[in-house]
Image: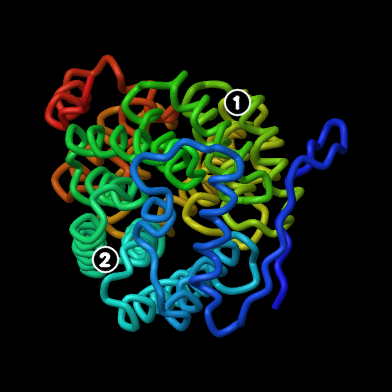
């Protein structure tokens, strides 16, 4: 096959550099490394140590393992595209990454990607004991990636994600996110994961700048725009959040969760009818129903609000404690909201990472019981 690499000034159209490579397709992965190394040298890029070693870090020489890894990457888009049920897409992604590491047990990038996929599944699609099992698997995969490639930024980001989402170890997660960014400042994935954590611990300006950088690096990624919207919402910049969500929907009109998240931004702005319309966009998930339970109450549709909350509790039990606390706080029932928050703390609810910044919990912030839970969570300062 023939591969031509070119560098062109996008402003002037001036041709700066090019090189053509004729190679046998059977050695495609070696060719990939050769081209990357040649481009690095030609552009006089500065990398730590040997450039080829840096390019190969965490990778594989097994084409079948690489193919499985790429299949896992493909499912990242399907989680937001509505082309497969959310849970099904996540499970297929985990299966693809698991196949990659089966084919190459030293494939650090695949272990890191599988860790992130397992954390994502545990936090968004699993229920009951499967939540804890998912996070334990994610931690094991991240630790394997770190053992194989200690300088791989994605491995540190994966480990940080499972520490903060699955084990509420926020202080250690902060160290790992900073390390990930130091190693991989140009990785959109590392930037996106770090930004979500930064806003949760109160580093709002850093979080927004980091999430915006992730969008610049990966502008066609629906998840990047969705993440930016969530960070802007937590930073109380809801008009900008709505713009970010609209950009996500322009890329994928059926992006799951995004209309519900946009509805919560409308809710913060007091635009209750716009919030209701956005949150009622099917398919309805727990985020839609969380929003609708609050919006119906604001619109004086108390029976509808009560019915939505009852359905949420019937479906999720104590697993949804943090969400019930959000709803009761907005209903003005602080006592009930605090009871559910205490349940969330007792059951290690995944939503607790957002305790410091969640807008729906604002009515509780001066309550001594709320402050005690925040103190016990030991967020880094």
Residue at the (26%, 56%) spot, across then down: 149
In the displayed structure, does residue 35 sit left or right of residue 117?
Answer: right
Which residue is at a point 31% across and 37% down the rendered structure image? 177
Is residue 121 visible in the rendered structure shown here?
Answer: yes
Q: Position of residue 34 (x, y in %)?
A: 52, 62
> In the image, is residue 170 above or below residue 77?
above
* Vertical comparison of 367 with 249: above or below: above
Residue 267 horizontal/vertical position (percent): 59, 31
Residue highlighted by disc 1: 238
Which class describes the residues within 10 Å of circle 1: few (<14), some (14-19), or many (20+)? many
Q: Secondary structure at mark 2?
A: helix
Q: Earlier in the sequence, mark 2 or mark 1?
A: 2
Give the position of the C terminus as an image quadrant: top left
Figure disc tally: 2
- The circle on residue 112 is none
Residue 66, percent from left and from top: 46, 74
Q: Which mark is residue 134?
A: 2
- Quarter of the image containing the N terminus? bottom right
Q: Nearer the viewer, residue 118 or 209?
A: 209
Pointer 2 and pointer 1: residues touching (CB < 8 Å)?
Answer: no
Residue 315 visible in the displayed image: no
Secondary structure of the residue carrying numbered label 1: helix
Answer few, some or many: residues within 10 Å of disc 2's Cα (few below 14, many 20 plus, some between 14 and 19). Answer: many
- Where is residue 277? Give x, y as percent: 70, 45
> Is 189 situated above or below 174?
below
Instruction: Give the Cα distance between marks 2 and 1.
Output: 32 Å
């Amino acid at each position: 096959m023939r591969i031509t690499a070119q560098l062109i000034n996008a402003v002037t159209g001036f041709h700066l550099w090019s090189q053509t490579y004729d190679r046998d397709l059977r050695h495609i992965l070696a060719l990939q490394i050769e081209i990357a190394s040649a481009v690095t040298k030609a552009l006089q890029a500065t990398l730590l140590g040997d450039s080829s070693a840096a390019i190969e870090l965490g990778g594989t020489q097994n084409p079948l393992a690489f193919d499985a890894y790429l299949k896992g990457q493909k499912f990242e888009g399907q989680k937001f595209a509505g082309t497969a049920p959310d849970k099904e897409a996540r499970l297929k992604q985990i299966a693809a990454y698991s196949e990659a590491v089966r084919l190459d047990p030293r494939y650090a990038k695949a272990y890191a990607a599988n860790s992130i996929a397992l954390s994502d599944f545990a936090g968004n699609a699993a229920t009951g004991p499967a939540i804890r099992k998912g996070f334990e698997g994610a931690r094991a995969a991240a630790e394997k990636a770190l053992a194989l490639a200690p300088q791989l930024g994605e491995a540190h980001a994966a480990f940080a994600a499972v520490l903060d989402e699955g084990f509420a170890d926020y202080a250690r997660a902060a160290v790992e996110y900073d390390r990930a960014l130091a190693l991989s400042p140009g990785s959109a994935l590392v930037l996106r994961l770090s930004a979500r954590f930064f806003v949760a611990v109160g580093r709002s300006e850093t979080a927004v700048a980091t999430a915006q950088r992730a969008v610049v690096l990966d502008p066609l990624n629906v998840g990047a725009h969705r993440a930016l919207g969530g960070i802007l919402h937590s930073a109380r910049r809801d008009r900008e959040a709505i713009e970010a969500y609209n950009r996500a929907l322009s890329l994928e009109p059926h992006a799951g969760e995004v209309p519900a998240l946009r509805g919560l931004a409308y809710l913060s702005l007091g635009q209750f009818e716009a919030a209701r319309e956005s949150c009622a966009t099917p398919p309805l998930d727990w985020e839609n129903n969380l929003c609708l339970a609050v919006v119906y109450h604001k619109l004086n549709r108390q029976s509808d609000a009560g019915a939505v909350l009852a359905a949420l509790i019937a479906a999720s039990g104590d697993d949804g404690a943090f969400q019930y606390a959000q709803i009761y706080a907005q209903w003005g029932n602080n006592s009930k909201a605090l009871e559910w928050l205490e349940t969330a703390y007792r059951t290690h609810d995944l939503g607790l990472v957002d305790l410091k910044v969640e807008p729906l919990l604002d009515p509780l912030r001066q309550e001594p019981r709320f402050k005690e839970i925040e103190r016990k969570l030991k967020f880094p300062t």
